[in-house]
Image (cartoon, rainbow, N blue to C red):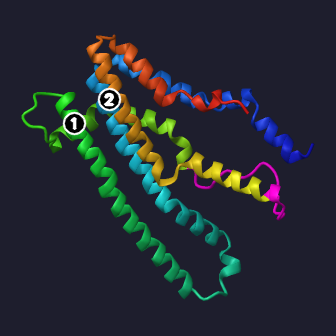
């Protein structure tokens, strides 16, 4: 058994995986605690989820766009003594291209992701209004009220999405097999695919939007069934914060 294999086995032990999930348990308890303390109703839960999806999701998009550049700048700064004899022109031009490309992507996802949440807020304002509904179009006062009343839930949601804000991807437990055998090539493809799926990239925030849409149907069913609000909160917070990945075998 190699040291790399030993590290992999130790890191994959169920006990260690559960120990790493304590922030999820803390977020779960904090979410339920807020719902109980503030006596939230279903509409409060819906709008708090909407706000966290918008703020945390947009932060994930910004991070995914600019974190590679941040990592590159960090590495270049660390090797600045070795790179000092090199001409600065190509590096500056490359940095400018990265910045312009990043700003273009940011503008696109600002409109696209923000548009999703705006349309979502129109429906929420009709079915789960925070006050008297004069028309279905939300206004700035409504958004400020949502931010003022439900910002603590954004912190809780950020804990659940904490792994999306790592600067560098996790290093493999052992040395990578770079041979050209069929087994080694297949193993590298599987590892790369697993890493891409785990990170989610720029599509990860949209998963929360889809999940929120599905929960709306659950809210409607719970409302008509006259379920206790706190039971609804417990189910929804379990969906959001319980580390379901730890129940997978292997």
Q: Is residue 129 visible?
A: no
| Residue span colored magenta | 166-184
The reply to whether callout 1 and callout 2 are in contact (CB within 8 Å) is yes
* Residue 176 painted magenta: yes
Instruction: State the SS at label 2.
Output: helix
Give above or below for 70 relative to 241.
below
Which residue is rendered at x = 48% and y = 62% of the image?
66
Can residue 93 be seen in the rendering of this structure?
A: yes
Image-quadrant location for residue 110: bottom left
Residue occupying image coordinates x 70% and y 56%? 189
Position of 145 relative to 181 (above/below)? above
Q: Which mark is residue 133?
A: none
State the image coordinates of residue 156 (x, y, percent, origin top left): 45, 33
Describe residue 17's horizontal placement relative to residue 141 as left or right. Answer: right
Q: Nearer the viewer, residue 140 or 239?
A: 239
**For residue 76, what is the image quadrant?**
bottom right
**Tag 1, which secondary structure?**
helix
Q: Which residue is mark 2?
A: 216
Name the quarter where the N terminus is drawn. top right
As measured in the structure, the alpha-carbon distance from the residue carrying label 1 to the one carrying label 2 is 10 Å
Q: Residue at x 48, y 73 (%)?
A: 98
Numbered tag placed on residue 123 in the rendering: 1
**Left or right relative to 236: residue 6:** right
The spot of residue 238 in percent (x, y) is 48, 24
- Above or below, comparing residue 184 to residue 44 in the picture: below
Q: Earlier in the sequence, mark 1 or mark 2?
A: 1
Query: Is 107 colored magenta in this rendering?
Result: no
In the image, residue 102 lies at what x, y percent? 43, 67
């Amino acid at each position: 058994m190699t040291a790399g294999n030993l590290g992999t086995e130790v890191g994959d032990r169920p006990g260690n995986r559960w120990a790493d999930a304590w922030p999820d348990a803390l977020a779960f308890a904090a979410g339920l605690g807020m719902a109980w303390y503030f006596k939230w109703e279903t509409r409060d839960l819906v709008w708090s989820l909407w706000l966290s999806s918008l703020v945390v999701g947009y932060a994930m998009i910004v991070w995914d766009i600019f974190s590679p550049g941040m990592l590159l700048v960090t590495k270049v700064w660390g090797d600045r003594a070795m790179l000092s004899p090199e001409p600065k022109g190509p590096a500056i031009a490359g940095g400018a291209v990265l910045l312009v490309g990043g700003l273009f992507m940011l503008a696109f996802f600002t409109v696209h992701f923000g548009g999703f949440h705006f349309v979502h807020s129109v429906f929420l304002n009709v079915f789960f209004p925070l006050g008297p509904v004069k028309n279905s179009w939300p206004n700035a006062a409504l958004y400020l009220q949502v931010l003022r009343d439900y910002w603590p839930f954004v912190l809780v949601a950020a804990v659940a999405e904490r792994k999306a804000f790592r600067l560098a991807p996790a290093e493999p437990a052992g040395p990578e097999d770079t041979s050209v055998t069929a087994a080694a090539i297949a193993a590298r493809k599987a590892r790369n695919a697993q890493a891409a799926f785990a990170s989610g990239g720029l599509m990860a925030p949209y998963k929360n939007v889809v999940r929120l849409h599905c929960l709306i149907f659950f809210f409607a069913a719970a409302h008509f069934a006259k379920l206790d609000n706190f039971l609804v909160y417990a189910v929804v917070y379990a969906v959001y914060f319980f580390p379901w990945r730890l129940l997978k075998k292997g």
